[in-house]
Image (cartoon, grey):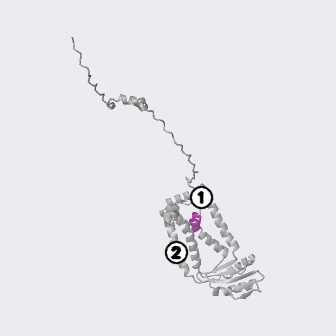
Amino acid sequence: MLSSNFLLPSTGGKKILRNVFLDPLHFVLAAGPLALYLLLLGGINLAARPLVTTGARDFLSLAIGVAGCAIAGPMELFFPESFAGTPWLAWLMLLSLYGMLALMIVLLSRPRLIVYNLTTSQLRPTLAKVVSKLDPEARWAGDSAFLPNLGVQFLVEPFNVLKNVQLVASSPAANVDGWRLLEKELVQALQPERTTPNPFGFVLTTFASLLAAAVVYSLLTHPDRISHSLETMLFPDNPPQVEPVKPTPPTEPVDSPPVDKPENESSKSNDPVKESSDNPADEPASEPDPPSSEPPADNP
């Protein structure tokens, strides 16, 4: 089932996508979570202190931010038609599938630690102290570090646009407890650190504010359309029912009843002699009698 508010029929039986901004519900679903995620990311970049988080939390927050776009886009486009009578059940299954897919990506990805609002040069001295504290036998090779006692080996990867540094595991076989201990010690070591805000955070905050304002405007100006579209999306009153096409039986030719002719017409057609005698106009004129050759007798 595809929402009639989102798709329009076109020539040739095909369907074309309509602009989502014309439908307030789909715009709110797509832009609302994304605006919150960008506001959160912009606020982190504008903070005056570093923030340490894991790769799993960072990816899950991103998955929640783009969940509305997934609902208004691929989920709506490929909605199963077999659930036309109970669409709320299909939406529950699709959202569960989306959540399980995000969790699977987190579980299959390598462990990571992300430090916001610090460059590599600012983080390196503190990170070296933490590594040597956790494992005296730790070794450095360029931007890579190996802690044999903890079973942790990571690579330092900077991301200058968002002003953060990522510590990515070098191998998938990593000790989870060792990474948790590294995160805990790194958070405690970076608490007294102060830094300058990232200018890119102003761009993120401004764009997120405009997007959030557009969402609020849609909610205030089209509350009836949004509520009606949401009810139709989850609990349709009249779900479409497809009736089977019944074959039409072949029609038999109907014999026309015989036309009874009048008796006079049938008798005329069967007796041509009588028909000619009944019509005096068609009879030939009788010839006059020839004159007699005998003289008339004298009267006495």
Can residue 189 be seen here? The reply is yes
Q: Main secondary structure of the magenta part?
A: helix
Q: Is residue 35 magenta?
A: no
* Quadrant of the snapshot with the N terminus: bottom right
| Segment colored magenta | 69-77
The disc, 1 or 2, on the residue closer to the chain's N-terminal end is 1
**Residue 151 location, x and y as percent?**
76, 80
Q: Residue at x 53, y 73 (%)?
A: 208
The quarter holding residue 139 reads: bottom right
Q: Is residue 76 magenta?
A: yes
**Residue 235 location, x and y as percent?**
57, 56
Q: Residue at x 52, y 75 (%)?
A: 207
Numbered label attached to residue 207: 2
Note whether 290 is above or below 17 in the view shown: above
Q: Which element carries disc 1, helix, strand or loop?
A: helix
* Quadrant of the snapshot with the C terminus: top left
* Along the viewing direction, whichever of 226 and 285 lies nearer the viewer: 285
Q: Are marks 1 and 2 in contact (CB under 8 Å)?
A: no
* Along the viewing direction, whichever of 294 and 152 lies nearer the viewer: 294
Q: Which element carries disc 2, helix, strand or loop?
A: helix
Please name the residue that numbered disc 1 is placed on: 81
The quarter holding residue 291 reads: top left
Note whether 250 is above or below 158 in the view shown: above
- Neighbor class of circle 1 (other Cα within 10 Å; few <14, some 14-19, many 20+) is few
Marks 1 and 2, Cα distance to the nearest angstrom?
Answer: 37 Å
